[in-house]
Amino acid sequence: MKVIKVLSVLILGIILAGPVFAQDWAGKVTELEGQVKIIRAGVESVARTGSAILAGDEIITGANSRARIWFKDESVITLAPNSRFRVDALEYQPGTRRKSIFTLVTGKARAMVSGWFSKTPEQDYQIKALSTVAGVRGTEFVIEIRGSGADMSALFAGLSGTLTIWDKDHPDKKVSVPANYFLEVLNGAIPGSPQPLTQELLMGILEGLGFSFGSRPDREDMILQIVFIPDHHGGEEGGPIEFVLVIPSSEENDRFNPSNLIFQEPPGFTAVNIIVNEKDFVAK
């Protein structure tokens, strides 16, 4: 009987654990530099290009480190150094349902948001920072948490589109922040009026959010091949010259498969054929 009881417990444990392993991914790390970590259910791991991000995960960037994450709701988040970002919830069915809720715990993040939205977009896509909530629809913006203690504030800068901002305890008092404007909100305060972005402030806001040419050596493997094809398409003598952009792929790095993204950014790479007739080439 003891054996039967132990087996029953083990089987029950496997059944209960099943949904955890079957949990669907919310996004993938498409670019990183330096030291980036993922905390999942209290367990810390090192993030790598292609690492899956699940709902509930926290992404942490170290000093001189940054990360870019592509989410399946068609948004992209870039984290500056010394940032901590949490995926609270992500459910996305284009044309049917969208629920994307994130929290910037510390640091700075740049968001590019597209995809499908319902008639109440502020409820579809939200990023929280301190006590302030930003509702988004088809826009690009930066959020930065500044200061410490009682002087902590959340700065929202609109780069395109419009942000809708409110204090979590006063959702009825919403403020719109258009492109090229910013709004800094003290922790626990009701948002005031947005101010125009100056060039100096914009440069400071964008600092730490850029990447070098690329963190993957195989970016340089994209080759432009020039192929001479005689009498191609029934052209004139000699035929046209065909330029083909060739992007190597492998089982581990298929850039044409959205479910297996590595460093692809929407809308991704597309093979390009350019047909040029010989008669278009004139000796100078």
Image (cartoon, rainbow, N blue to C red):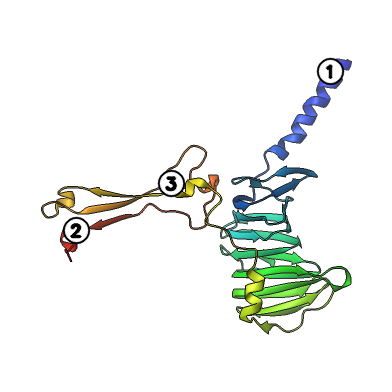
Q: Residues within 10 Å of mark 1 (few under 14, many from 20)?
A: few
Front residue (pair 89, 33) = 33
Which type of secondary structure does the marked residue at label 1 adopt?
helix
**Residue 4 circle label:** 1
Quote the CA–CA distance across marks 3 and 2: 27 Å
The residue pinned by badge 2 equals 277
Amino acid marked by disc 1: Ile
* Sooner in the amino-acid sequence: mark 2 or mark 1: 1
Q: x, y percentage for residue 282? A: 17, 64
Q: Position of residue 48 (x, y in %)?
A: 63, 45
Q: Quadrant of the C terminus?
A: bottom left
Contact? badges 3 and 1 (CB < 8 Å)? no
Q: Which mark is residue 221?
A: 3
Does residue 3 appear left or right of residue 34 in this picture?
right
The image quadrant where one finds the N terminus is top right
Residue 154 lies in what quarter of the image?
A: bottom right
Q: Nearer the viewer, residue 45 or 93?
A: 45
